[in-house]
Image (cartoon, helix red, strand yellow):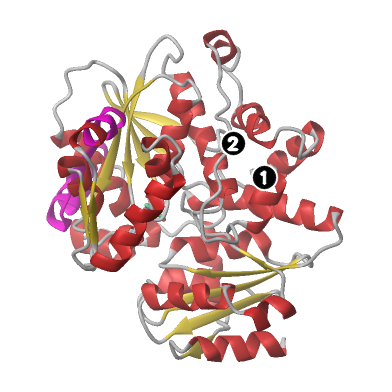
Amino acid sequence: MLNFEQAATRGLAPDGGLYVPANWPTFGTNELRALVGKSYRETALEVLLRFSGDSIPADELGQIIDDAYKHFDHPDIAPLREIRPDVHMLELFHGPTLSFKDYALQFLGRVMDWSLKKNAQHLTVVGATSGDTGSAAISAVAGRDTIDLYMLHPFQRVSEMQRRQMTTNQNSNIFNYAIDGTFDDCQAIVKTIFNDHEVQRRHSLGAVNSINWGRISAQVVYYFYAALQLGAPDQSVRFAVPTGNFGNVFAAWTAARMGLPIADIIVCSNANDILTRFFETGEMKKHGVRQTVTPSMDIEVSSNFERFLFELFERDGTEVESLIQSLNQTGSFSVSNSKLLEAQSHFSACRVNDAETCQSIARHFEQTGDIIDPHSAVALSAVERLPDDSNVPTVVVATAHPAKFPETIEHTLGAQVPTPKQLREIIELPERYRCLSSDPDELKTLMLAA
Ligand SMILES: *Cc1c(COP(=O)(O)O)cnc(C)c1O
């Protein structure tokens, strides 16, 4: 068994499985009450200490947290705003790269650096991105001499803003590659590299994609922070989460498992609705990925869903492995009716198509004058659509700043989003990246020569 530090630094288990805590830590009602009124960083320390145990001394964990959120551009770090009676928006786009990925990666990058320094080690991180993970990971590790980062993105399939956020970084430990293929091709290369013995002999490899437990743990924090402001532990709260890899919703599930009173977690999908179909029918069935106005949710195989299956099947790893194998080999698997009912008791699900997403952006702009990003609009649209007679406060999780998706906003509103300073800087800077084919040998040759 690994401790928190080791699981966060490696990211990926050697057998291809995902790390989860051996036991779920919990907060009793009085312990929750003691968290009311605490700042984001104080909340983060209390929550993350429950996961890190004694693998990171409390004072050093506190310093890592303080440093990780120092450069966020809002004093609340994750501000909660009431947008209409009993509906609140949790803004998770105040980090350096303007998506919620910063909340996890700024923390994780520092935990890795702390651990590697302490053990006099060096790590080579290889990752694939469909847009936001790449820039958030680069921002978190750029300039650190403990880590080299190889980031692969699909050539001409990320937005110009997203590409520039990655490729204008000038640090010598950052290597950007544009792959002639899709996001899936990028991920296939990463998999091949991780399993290659020659690369393993030359590099000590680590992963920062959302299967890294360190990322999920840091995301649990903002669910506590938001619910405690809305009356928890005496009041339960409902969250609507735009979903791709199931990481952010799994963090919400974790918060509930730890004792936070969460009435419902709404899994919001775009046209890639494999998760919504699962929660409706109990069958997970691949259809093929479609491109939408919410590219960070254009995913079919949600890797973190495996963590929920593990819990749903009472931690029976063999059972979960056979379901995943069936998905890989036949394109589908099903669970029994009783397992479906159990899953539905934790999550609701909703699909939102591109037209509905854009309508939601337009309606919100008319009503409030605020511009929201398309991913956040998927969650808002789901909340508008789902019946709610529960009278619990609802939180729409806003995962990105609209300026990251100027084309969709302009097309929908006929108005331009003001460019925040985080993006203004990169428009001028020169880009640095290399194009590679989808043959993993090309990257392998480069990594062996490095
Ligand atoms: C990554 C991302 C998502 C999807 O989050 P998951 O944790 O993968 O479900 C949603 N919105 C934005 C803006 C993202 O960058």
Residue 1: image quadrant is top right
Point out the tag, 2 or 1, that comes first from the N-terminus.
1
Instruction: Give the numbered dot on residue 1.
Output: 1
Examine the rendering and report whether any part of residue 9 can be seen: yes
Task: Report the side of 187 relative to 32 (left or right).
Answer: left
Vertical position of residue 448 compared to residue 346: above or below: below
Residues in magenta? 340-369
Q: Is residue 35 magenta?
A: no
Vertical position of residue 352 compared to residue 138: above or below: above
Task: Tell me how far mark 2 sits from mark 1, CA to CA.
Answer: 8 Å
Report x, y in % for residue 95: 55, 49
Q: Please, what secondary structure does the residue beneath circle 2 have?
A: loop
Instruction: Give the numbered dot on residue 215.
Output: none
Report x, y in % for residue 307: 44, 45
Examine the rendering and report whether any part of residue 168 can be seen: no
Task: Report the side of 335 relative to 171 (left or right).
Answer: left
* Residue beneath the point at 15% across and 54% down: 353
The answer to which of 415 and 57 lies nearer the viewer is: 57
* Residue beneath the point at 60% across and 47% down: 214
Q: Quick one: label 1, few (<14), some, or many (20+) residues within 10 Å?
A: few
Residue corresponding to mark 2: 22
